[in-house]
């Protein structure tokens, strides 16, 4: 793969071109079609995945439904727990939302890189801890917060992660179905549809071609303040 693509990932950005070229030689590249599974919860895994293009969801099968834990796109990575712990069983599943191209690094190749350049490991650990905090917040949201507030919180999180500012507000630059949002908030698709219609009636959001524009982010935040 092109070594310069690795510069999109924060834990590689400090490396010189020669070192990036060496890492690129260890990478394999694979393209997945829309809706294709990458791995399943409980499977053994020893790969780190870097998203070159496309969108990937990380989810858990909660018996009757999927619960989406995270959504990753170009410049993100996932599967880091396979590198950080001896237990190789995946804690969640991964599936593409759009056609996606991924760079894959195997643990046996990546560990020597970490030993020779510990700043890479520090960057991965910082991200892993942030994701752990987000997961804890998600658990709290699913158990103690009403659906409208859950949806507002998810929309605000998506503006932080995937938002593009515009004169009209902040566009969440992802094409998400109502089912995706239901799986992110632990509720039924019909309930999400009703809540989104309510937010549109209040002119807090606008939906166009499955992308959500948050028109008034301060008023959306106010929904959280009434908890």
Image (cartoon, helix red, strand yellow):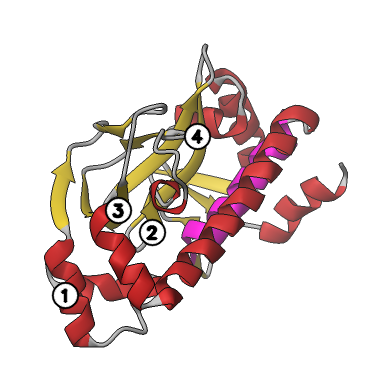
Q: Residue at x 88, y 44 (%)?
A: 226
Establish if 134 lies above or below 170: above
Q: Which mark is residue 76?
A: 2
| Element under disc 3 | helix
- The earlier-in-sequence mark between 1 and 3 is 1
State yes or no: residue 146 in magenta.
no
Alpha-carbon neighbours of circle 2 within 10 Å: few (<14), some, or many (≥20)?
some
Q: CA distance from mark 1 to mark 3?
A: 15 Å
Q: Is residue 132 left or right of residue 104?
A: right
Q: CA distance from mark 2 to mark 3?
A: 18 Å
Which segment is the magenta one? 147-164
Q: Nearer the viewer, mark 2 or mark 1?
A: 1
Q: Is residue 89 left or right of residue 130?
A: left
Residue under pointer 1: 22
- Marks 2 and 3 close (CB-CB < 8 Å): no
- The answer to whether residue 152 shows anywhere in this view is no
Give percent across and percent down for residue 161: 51, 59
Give percent across and percent down for residue 106: 25, 52
Residue under pointer 3: 107
Residue under pointer 4: 68
Give percent across and percent down for residue 188: 58, 19
């Amino acid at each position: 793969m092109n070594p310069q693509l690795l510069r999109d990932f924060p834990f590689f950005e400090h490396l010189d071109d020669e070192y990036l070229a060496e890492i690129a030689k260890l990478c394999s590249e694979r393209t997945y079609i829309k809706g294709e599974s990458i791995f399943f919860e409980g499977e053994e895994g020893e790969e780190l995945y870097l998203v070159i293009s496309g969108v990937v969801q990380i989810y858990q099968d909660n018996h009757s439904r999927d619960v989406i834990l995270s959504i990753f796109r170009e410049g993100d990575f996932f599967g880091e727990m396979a590198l950080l712990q001896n237990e190789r069983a995946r804690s969640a599943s991964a599936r593409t939302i759009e056609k996606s191209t991924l760079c894959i690094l195997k643990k046996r190749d990546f560990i020597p890189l970490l030993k020779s350049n510990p700043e890479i490991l520090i960057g991965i650990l910082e991200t892993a801890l942030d994701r752990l905090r987000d997961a804890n917040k998600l658990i709290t949201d699913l158990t103690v917060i009403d659906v409208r507030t859950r949806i507002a919180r998810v929309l605000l999180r998506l503006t932080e992660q995937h938002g593009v500012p515009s004169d009209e507000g902040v566009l969440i630059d992802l094409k998400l179905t109502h089912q995706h949002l239901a799986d992110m908030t632990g509720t039924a698709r019909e309930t999400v549809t009703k809540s989104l219609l309510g937010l549109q009636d209040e002119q807090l959001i606008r939906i166009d071609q499955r992308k959500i524009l948050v028109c008034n982010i301060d008023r959306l935040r106010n929904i959280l303040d009434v908890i």
